Image (tube, rainbow, N blue to C red):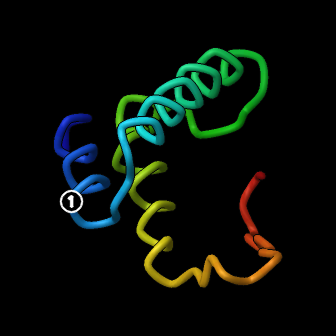
Amino acid sequence: MQEFEVINILKKDLNFTDHSIKKLKEFINLVLKENKNYNLIARSTEKQIWERHVLDSAQLVKFIDFKLKSLADLGSGAG
């Protein structure tokens, strides 16, 4: 899946704004830059970062109650 396809899903299905997409792009650039020094994501998945990492995480937005005052991420990955 290409970057533009993921961005379309984020906008149409998950109501991401242009501002949010811009911030995601900045974050992705930072992750890829820092991944050279730290193993943030598997190097084998860098080219699929939009699908494997962004979309995979973003789809959880549907289940978040943004009216709550706090949120915890109890994941088991490297982060």
State the SS at label 1.
helix
Q: Callout 1: few (<14), some (14-19), or many (20+) C-alpha neighbours within 10 Å?
A: few
Is 5 situated above or below 36?
Answer: below
Seen at 58% across and 39% down, the residue is 42
Outermost residue to the front:
67
Seen at 47% across and 42% down, the residue is 20
Q: Is residue 66 left or right of residue 62?
A: right
Q: Residue 48, how many percent across, how many down?
A: 36, 38
Q: Quadrant of residue 39?
A: top right
Seen at 31% across and 54% down, the residue is 10
Q: Residue 51, how many percent across, how many down?
A: 34, 49
**Which quadrant holds the N terminus?**
top left
Q: Residue 40, how many percent across, how many down?
A: 70, 37
To which residue does mark 1 refer? 12
The amino acid type found where label 1 is placed reads Lys
Q: Is residue 8 left or right of residue 55?
A: left
Seen at 38% across and 53% down, the residue is 16
Q: Quadrant of residue 62?
A: bottom left
Q: Is residue 74 left or right of residue 63?
A: right
Q: Residue 29, how many percent across, how many down?
A: 54, 20
Nearest the eye: 17 or 25: 17
Nearest the eye: 72 or 1: 72
Number of numbered discs on residues: 1
Is 6 situated above or below 55?
Answer: above
